[in-house]
Image (cartoon, rainbow, N blue to C red):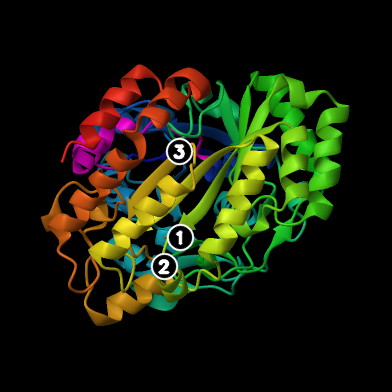
Amino acid sequence: MRVLLINPSMNMQKLGRFAELLEPMPPTGIAYIAGALVAAGHHTRAVDMFGEKLIASEVLDRVKRFAPDLVGMTVLTPSAPTCEKLARLIRVACPTTKIVWGGVHADVFAKDILRSGAADYVVNHDGEDTIVELCAAMESGETDLSRIDGLTWLDRSGGKSGDAVTNKTRALRRDLDSLAYPEWDLFPYHRYGLLPFADVAKPVLTMTGSRGCPYRCDYCSLLHSGKVYRRRDPFKIVDEYEYLVDRYGVKQIGLVDPIFPLVVKDLKPLCEELVRRGLDQKCSWLSETRADRLDEETCRLMYEGGCRRVLMGIESGVDMLLGNVNKNLTTEKVRWGVQNAKKAGLSTVGLFMIGMPGETPEMTRETIEFAVDLDLDFAKFAITVPFPGSKLFEDQWQKTLFRDDWENYTTFNPDADRLVYHPEGYDPELLIKMQSYGLRRFYMRYEQVRRQLVELKTINPKMMLYGLYGMAI
């Protein structure tokens, strides 16, 4: 089979003054899909629309040149309109090519997507095994796809016009170590970075050490992709880590798990093996986790193993708001975790949400002051968005949301009229102003400016200028 995978872009104009703060990040999920397809013997290519800054017509030119049997797209909520546009163009230019979508957004709206004609198939949840089985069925000419678990498709048997059918849910793959490595050769990996506050060194690539999450935060859409936590063998993680260093010359690796590390019993052998192979000296790594997982031993092991920066989903400085979204975290525990990380020598990044359910402007200000008081190295203040797949989305959709202008589902939205969600009684104009105020309050302090320029040296002058522009409300 000839398979072309597309990592679509979103409409960057919707981000306004924040657009230049984004840089292409490694599309980890679709790279693992590419690895599975190549391992199965399929002729696979990839187009990173965002990474290569392509417009739709340029993507279409590549589709036509490759003439694939199947085009696959990974669909994030803000990029859904772009995927729809690409699908319409491909339908006209390559009428025999089939289209498959994957990702949480596609999973949530699978039947609607098929009925609209935007795709022929939707892969639900983990996609590596499903996409390989789908390609095998297409290659053999099989029209009855009911045996492929984890697939939504149009059943046209028995004279049907095309009923959208969701097959049996695929059992979650427990053996993550047998998955093929991501096929990064198909992607412009030399262009990738992470978020401006996450880049320690370049080149950068990403990998996963686990899948699933044992927590149930209301705002998180990852629960729709599997609630069961599945871990990899620490030595297998190091094998892939070493492969990325040797094959691609990376200087930094991002662990993109929802929470990594989760338990010390996995972290200790991982870090010891990184040191034994000398990888702690060749490449640094970072991960995102919860502050209440960062005890002294965990932080010490992480630093000794080459971790240099940790991202913490703190969300709010108000305990009541954390309870409102089922975060199961307290500000006291956050202070404890941040203190342990800093003591071990780890750079700290706080990820905050403003405009959470029940929030007032006074509470937003309290969150901002909490971030300052923690003395973090970096802070991100994102406007709360009820993403499809989350409990927050389901709750708000049933109440007042009813918004399918997906390109506006962004956490940095400069236009109050397009703001998808704001707490009851919280003026959207004020919410956007509070976001900019939070950035100014945190970064425009002498000690913070000195730290960025003299110690951390992470945010380059260009990003600083764009950051100043983003604060200018």
Residue 13 screen position, x and y as percent? 19, 38
Pointer 1 and pointer 2: residues touching (CB < 8 Å)?
Answer: yes
Q: Nearer the viewer, residue 399 or 51?
A: 399
Earlier in the chain: of badge 3 and badge 1, it is: 1
Q: Nearer the viewer, residue 343 or 154?
A: 343
Look at the picture and state if 349 lies above or below 465. Answer: below
- Mark 3 and mark 2: Cα distance apart in space: 33 Å
Rate crowding at label 2 as few (under 14), some (14 to 19) or many (20 or more) other CA atoms within 10 Å. some
Which residue is found at the position 72% from the left and 20% from the top?
282
Look at the picture and state if 416 lies above or below 93. Answer: below
In this orientation, does residue 448 appear?
A: yes
Residue 50 screen position, x and y as percent? 36, 33
User: Which quadrant of the rendered structure holds the N terminus?
Assistant: top right
Magenta-drawn stretch contains 15: yes
In this orientation, does residue 207 appear?
A: no
Picture quadrant where residue 171 is located = bottom right
Rate crowding at label 3 as few (under 14), some (14 to 19) or many (20 or more) other CA atoms within 10 Å. many
**Residue corresponding to mark 1:** 104
Look at the picture and state if 68 lies above or below 201. Answer: below
- Mark 1 and mark 2: Cα distance apart in space: 6 Å
- The residue range painted magenta reads 10-27
- Mark 3 and mark 1: Cα distance apart in space: 28 Å
Pointer 3 and pointer 2: residues touching (CB < 8 Å)?
Answer: no
**Which of the labelled discs sits on residue 258, or is there none?**
none
The amino acid on which the numbered mark 3 sits, given as a three-letter code, is: Phe
Q: Nearer the viewer, residue 247 or 338?
A: 338
**Which of the labelled discs sits on residue 378, or is there none?**
3
The amino acid on which the numbered mark 2 sits, given as a three-letter code, is: Val
Disc 2 on helix, strand or loop?
Answer: helix
**Which of the labelled discs sits on residue 108, or is there none?**
2
